[in-house]
Structure formats: structure tokens, C-alpha cells
Image (cartoon, rainbow, N blue to C red):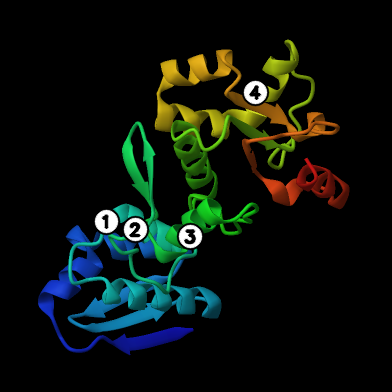
Amino acid sequence: MILRHTFAPPDNERMAHLCGPMDRHIRSIEAALQVKVAHRFEQFRVEGPKARAQQAMEVLQAMYEMSRKPIPEEQVQLMLAGDTALPEAGEDALAMQTRRGEVRGRTPNQARYLENMATHDITFGIGPAGTGKTYLAVACAVDSLERSAVQKIVLTRPAVEAGERLGFLPGDLTQKVDPYLRPLYDALYDLMGFDKVQKAFERQQIEIAPLAFMRGRTLNHAFVILDEAQNTTPEQMKMFLTR
């Protein structure tokens, strides 16, 4: 399928921001969606399977809306992962305080996700991989712990492999489940620093455990994050929500 679109009004500066240095943004779209993008000034032509060609054109349209200033490469990747139809979040978006400074949502969807976590007892985050669901949830948890809004952070996820069986893992219980929980450790180290995370573990302010060990527990004054929740069974989800 071939789609054509002309962006108006013509603006060379906006076209430069849209395409990126040396057409880097265009190449990213082509590689991610397996389409061919050709352009001459403000006239664009996208060739590829119907669904992917339409998605590429939607990404280009969204990028044009925010092309009054240079578009960061990470913003393009976010849009290719699913946040396509919205401009960047405003400067008044809710910010989480962490070791890295303020963490804000890069898009309105991310900003709304942070706001919902700050104002609701239960928040579900749904979206493609790489859109910041786990990272932003951990940032919100770290901010709550630093403000003493909660006394403990509990991070859990079902111990499910991604497409291949790992078989028997040696070591004690902690060493067996660590490979499954590594994304949560990475986010904590990035947001708090290694030494501070280790001290929080020693004081039992942070706890990471597989979902199987949540049964029978009562969690008070805690910020609880269930990562990779799509791999839970209905019984596991009911058990988790009643903790």
C-alpha cells in the first residue's frame, strides 16, 4: 500500500526537525515498521503493508505537530512504541523526586499514568514494551518512600520466562528468582543509587519477591507494584488485589 501526504504550511525548519539529522528519524521509522518513506520537501510517500504504512503516517503526523523544536530520538522511539497521536506533556506535568532529579512523563499518557498513581489506590498500566510502565511506577514508589508517604516498597512479578525455558537455576531462593526480577532492580539502582538501595533492603524498606510468595500476607502503608501482570492467572490477580 502507498500513502501520500503533504504537510502544510511549508516550513523548512519544521521539516528538518521532523526528519532529524541526516534523516535519522525517517530511518528509525523505516527500520521499526519495515516500510519505505520517501519525501521531497513537505510531500511524503510511505510504501508498505497497509497497517504499517498507516502507522508510519500517523507517527509522521504526530511528529509534525511537535516539530516546532527539535525532536529527541527517544521521543521518536516512544511514539513508535505506541504513543503516536499526542504531543509532549506540558511543563506543569506531575514530577517525581528521585536521585536523578525530577522524573516527569514525556508524553501526556505517561503524565496521566503518574497522576493516576499519585491520586488512586489502584492503577493499571497497559501498553507496549518500552513505554515506561515499570520505570515510572518505580519512580512513583521511590518518591512516595522519600516523602514518607509509605513505609515500604514491595515489588513483585510472576516468575515467567520470555519465550524460552531456563530450566533449573542453582542457588538459594533469592538467587533463583533474581533473574526474573532484574528489571525492577535496574530501575531502583537508576533512581536511588546502589548504596541507598542496599541500605533500604537492609532496613526492609524495599522488598522484592515473586508473586507466588504474596499469598497470606497483609501489606499496610506500602507501595506495591505488580510487574508483568499480564502473565498472572485470575486467581493470582484476585489474591494480589486483596493483599
Per the model, the C-alpha gap separating discs 3 and 1 is 15 Å
For discs 4 and 3, the disc positioned in front in the rendered view: 4
Q: Earlier in the sequence, mark 4 or mark 3?
A: 3
Residue 222 image offset from top left, x and y in percent: 63, 35
Per the model, the C-alpha gap separating discs 4 and 3 is 27 Å
Residue visible at 44% across and 32% down? 146
Residue visible at 64% across and 27% down? 208
CB of mark 2 within 8 Å of CB of mark 1? yes
Per the model, the C-alpha gap separating discs 2 and 3 is 10 Å
Q: Which residue is mark 3?
A: 81
Q: Earlier in the sequence, mark 4 or mark 1?
A: 1
CB of mark 2 within 8 Å of CB of mark 3? no
Q: Residues within 10 Å of mark 1 (few under 14, many from 20)?
A: few
Q: Which residue is mark 4?
A: 178
Q: Residues within 10 Å of mark 3 (few under 14, many from 20)?
A: some
Residue 234 image offset from top left, x and y in percent: 85, 52
Nearer to us in this view, 83 or 106: 106
Amino acid type of the residue tagged 1 in the rendering: Pro
Q: Residues within 10 Å of mark 2 (few under 14, many from 20)?
A: some
Q: Quadrant of the C terminus?
A: top right
Query: Is residue 124 placed above or below 157 in the rendered structure?
Result: below
Q: Quadrant of residue 93?
A: bottom left
Q: Which residue is mark 2?
A: 75
CB of mark 2 within 8 Å of CB of mark 4? no
Image position of 182 (left or right of 79):
right
Per the model, the C-alpha gap separating discs 2 and 1 is 5 Å
